[in-house]
Image (tube, helix red, strand yellow):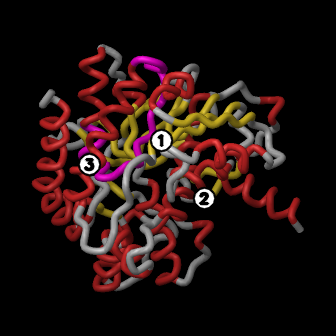
Amino acid sequence: MRSSMLRSVRLALTSTSSVAKGQVLRRGFSSESVPERKVVVLGAAGGIGQPLSLLMKLNPLVSSLSLYDIAATPGVAADVSHINARSEVKGYVGEENLGEALKGADVVIIPAGVPRKPGMTRDDLFNINAGIVKSLCAAIAKYCPHAVVNMISNPVNSTVPIAAEVFKKAGTYDEKKLFGVTTLDVVRARTFYAGKANVPVAGVNVPVVGGHAGITILPLFSQATPQPNLPHEELVALTKRTQDGGTEVVEAKAGKGSATLSMAYAGALFADACLKGLNGVPDVVECSFVQSSVTELPFFASKVRLGKNGVEEVLGLGALSDFEKEGLESLKPELKLSIEKGIKFANQS
């Protein structure tokens, strides 16, 4: 039973969706057939970091797993290291060990910071998490400037621009290697759509564009596969639920946490896609918040083709319904302010 469950988890992590065909393709790898890859989790002892570390340990594409946090990391690393999966696990605690944790990294995942609690806005999160992200990115620029960076720490609409500015100041910025992880929006859109449409979720794909907070999240249900047969009012409700998915979990947990487990799952899916791209697997396409010319905004989430250099191609939005066109115009002012807020913070000192 345990071995079959482990195989199922590994299979889930090494599967990716084919956006062009709307089908789920499963690409399995043996540890002998793939390169050595070091993955670092910054914030590994937190609510997202712990389950994310577990899921990355299960990923056969990872050969070295480096876990960092300001406290409690040795225990997390010891626990995860006992799992009979490929990667070697090392734990690092405290700023004095951050450099060693980062050296040689291929992918750095950042879930560090505080979670959202009931009543907290993403502006509240910004006041705490912005400084954390800024200091971690300065260390990335110094110790692993060529790594692919997966930003989970909220508010992603601002923390990605902060990271970009830090890397620019350090002379290490590569727009192809900085990603805001918006995969949880896609995961939610798929799940909610499958439930309403009464179709198997494994065959569902829904692109989600824009940003990663509230109305800036724009699921494109008109492009969903299988093709939507839902009335307009249900698509409006699904859009709203996808946008408010984080709040739904925060309220359900009643002050005892945020969307840690589903975020860890989504973060592991996106990191897996990045590893596949680095390893040369063709046609790996995921939605992500990246530097973009798709709209007039400098950063925007849309479908991205991943490859050996990170972003191989930022894909266009495709045909939108009238409702989605309205949503696109409505989200732009808020997303613009969030981006500018991050840039301003990064350049204050």
Say which mark, if any, is on residue 157: 3
Decide if residue 269 is in sight here. no
Give the CA separation, mark 2 to mark 1. Answer: 41 Å
Query: Is residue 216 depicted above or below 196 in this figure?
Result: above
Task: Write down the quadrant of residue 253 in the picture.
Answer: bottom left
Residue drawn at x 27%, y 40% as measured from the top left:
131
Read off the magenta span.
142-161
Query: Is residue 162 depicted above or below 104 in this figure?
Result: below
Query: Residue 157: within the magenta?
Result: yes
Is 130 on the left or on the right of 59, as rendered? Answer: left
Say which mark, if any, is on residue 23: 2
Decide if residue 137 is in sight here. yes
Is 332 on the left or on the right of 69, as rendered? Answer: left
Query: Is residue 294 depicted above or below 145 in this figure?
Result: below
* Tag in front: 3 or 2: 3
Is 204 on the left or on the right of 297, as rendered? Answer: right
Do labels 1 and 3 touch, CB within 8 Å? no
The location of residue 157, given as percent across then percent down, is 26, 48
User: How many badges with numbers are in the image?
Assistant: 3
Disc 2 crowd rating (10 Å Cα; few below 14, some 14-19, many 20+) is some
Q: Which comes before the other along the chain, label 3 or label 2?
A: 2
Q: Amino acid at mark 3?
A: Asn
Residue drawn at x 54%, y 67% as measured from the top left:
204
